[in-house]
Image (cartoon, grey):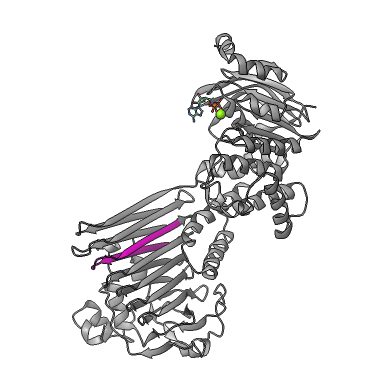
Amino acid sequence: MALLEIKNLHASVAGKEILKGITLSVEPGAVHAIMGPNGTGKSTLSNVIAGREGYDVTQGEVLLDGKNVLAMSPDERARAGIFLAFQYPVEIPGVTTSAFLKTALNAKRRAEGKTEVDAMEFLKLVKAKTAALGMPYDMIKRALNVGFSGGEKKRAEVLQMTLLEPRLAILDETDSGLDIDALKVVSDGVNALRAPDRAFLVITHYQRLLDYIVPDHVHVLAHGRIAASGGKDLALELEAEGYAKYLDTAA
Amino acid sequence: MKPSEIIDHPFAGAYAKRLGVKTPWQGHLPGPKMEAWRFTPLRTLANTPFVPASASAEVDVTELPRGVPLIAGAARLVLVNGAYREDLSDADFGPGVTISTAEAFASSSRSPLALLNAAYASAGVSIDAAGPGLRPIHLVSIGAAGAEPAAFHPRLRITVAPGASLTIIESHVGLPGQTYFSNPVTEIALAENANLRRYVSVAEDSEAFHLATATISIAAGGSLEAFHLGLGGALVRQDITVRFAGRGAAARLNGAYALSGRSHHDFTTVMDHNVPDCRSSQVFKGVADGDSHGVFQGRIHVARDAQKTDARQLHKALFLSRGPEIDCKPELEIYADDVQCAHGAATGEIDHDQLFYLMSRGIDPATARSLLVEGFLTEAVDEISVPEVQALFRDAIGAWLKSRDIARARP
Ligand SMILES: Nc1ncnc2c1ncn2[C@@H]1O[C@H](COP(=O)(O)OP(=O)(O)OP(=O)(O)O)[C@@H](O)[C@H]1O
Ligand SMILES: [Mg+2]
């Protein structure tokens, strides 16, 4: 069974149809890259899968391990294994990153019937994960995302992902805002998580990321539809030729 | 204010009849037509048949009510129904601090409630601090009504001598399930280069009334850092006036409130800048749930001569449901031209993007909302410079959040 199954998904925002029939099947262990021009619905697709409000799904289905994702609340989806690394991570004043991480981690552990981590275990775990991502450990004492630089926010998203070990990770332009070294560190973090029972949807504008996180499939999203799918070479082709031919045909 | 000074005031009659007629003062309470009381109606207070609270010695209080923290290193001073209880207080306040009970001393406040206090207060309690290395004081005011609703009028004076530095933590609480009216008046004088850190927590019983009036004067170079927490009571008002009396004086006056049920909480502040080169800053944050009502009235007055004043004020509040009401009234009266004054106010609901972000990490909505509310109030509590007190107040807010299910209160 596919890990994620999207069937003929239509969704609109403020009365305007953005997703116009998306069908996509993601097998466990696979990495799918989604590319496409600005404003074609890549973030909309991520948000609909994660359960953000403000999107009307007018047709279609999203299944995770065969279960109807669209009927679940965002927190249920997360506990079922969906993780969205936000294109624009949200600042949460007054809530320390560490308190947030611990709450999220324990919510997941409870859902899995495991015991909660205690303060010592948690600190050890976070120390190791921050070090692996080249983040200063002290960062977790700061309010979540508040005053983080663009790149720091993206690293913090990946830190959350490596802590929560989701089944399906959606990375919405996680590479934008990262410097060249950070891109490598973050990609290593993602690659380390690659596993037979886990899948990734990697949304990006840049082929460079896909040199590090090598995808099994590449899709072009244009005008709310998947206009083309192929192997990793499709990304190279897009890099060379741009999106013009998909915009013409899909218009 | 000496009894002789209030002879021309409506409460003079009340004073004459004290301990006599049951509720002679209630007809004289400020009404909604008085601008300062527009948002805080006193009808219920006026209609409750209070008797004067028993002299404290007769009240059977042998231990502190639940929720009053034990503060390591602080000397405890306990008032029951407004009167000093030696048996519950520490014997030794350390060098430099003198506690005395004195005949009611003057208050510079002309608020009707302060006058009422003057008419009814029994002996005042005076805390006089001088010299280095002062031990912090934990003042606990306990309301204990008994079978009938009872009123009491604590009268406090705090003086800090030149160059001295004092920390005082106040816990205002009551015995559960009782209807009482606490009407404390506090007069504070900071001498030149004196410092006071004053942290006040008002967590009265849900049937209780608490109308506090505090006046703080700060001489040249002196500084005040105050934090006021309001966590409940049927009707609570914390009325705080800071008078800058000498150059280079500074005040940081911050606070937070968290309201539920039918609680009403009012912060009324006045920053009275009469001399040049003084600084005041205020950050107040509140959350309101149920059918509660929050009020913030902040007046900044800068006299013509008070050049180079720096005065800032911020009030932010969150509605946790559709039921509550929040009124905010900043007032800037600025007569000097070379000043920096700023005020800001914002009310809203819990941010949907923030809520989604937390939930997208598997955190259930109740916990997510609770984290956000705590974070919102924490930003104000972070202004407290003493880490132990900061932790104490944060815990109090945490307990308030736990005691209720804010998840059910959907916007
Ligand atoms: N709340 C909204 N109200 C109106 N239009 C919206 C709203 N949210 C998204 N849209 C529109 O939906 C379209 C798709 O947006 P989306 O963010 O999914 O694009 P994207 O493919 O992620 O683009 P980018 O590459 O720039 O991140 C855009 O035209 C956008 O303006
Ligand atoms: Mg996008």
Instruction: Please say if A30 is above or below B402.
Output: above
Which residue is located at x 68 percent, y 39 percent? Answer: A185
Which residue is located at x 53 percent, y 84 percent? Answer: B61
Residue B393 rendering spot, x and y as whole percentages:
52, 66
Residue at the top extreme, as displayed:
A249
Magenta region: B261-286
Residue A244 rendering spot, x and y as whole percentages:
56, 12
Quarter occupied by residue B38: bottom left
In the image, B328 versus B117, the foreground residue is: B328
* Residue B143 visible to the viewer: no
Residue B245 rendering spot, x and y as whole percentages:
26, 73
* Residue B376 visible to the viewer: yes
Judge from the rendering whether residue A171 lies leftward or rightward of residue B196; answer left or right. right
Quadrant (top left, top right, bottom left, bottom right) of the N terminus of chain B: bottom left
Instruction: Please say if B352 is above or below B380.
Output: above
Instruction: Please say if B57 is above or below A25.
Output: below
Which residue is located at x 29 percent, y 56 percent? Answer: B341
In the image, B400 versus B312, the foreground residue is: B312
Which residue is located at x 35 percent, y 52 percent? Answer: B344
Instruction: Please say if B335 is above or below A144.
Output: below
Inspect the magenta stretch and tell me whether residue A46 lies in it: no
- Secondary structure of the magenta portion, mostly? strand
Judge from the rendering whether residue B310 lies leftward or rightward of residue A24; answer left or right. left
Residue B4 rendering spot, x and y as whole percentages:
22, 87
Judge from the rendering whether residue B18 lies leftward or rightward of residue B361; answer left or right. left
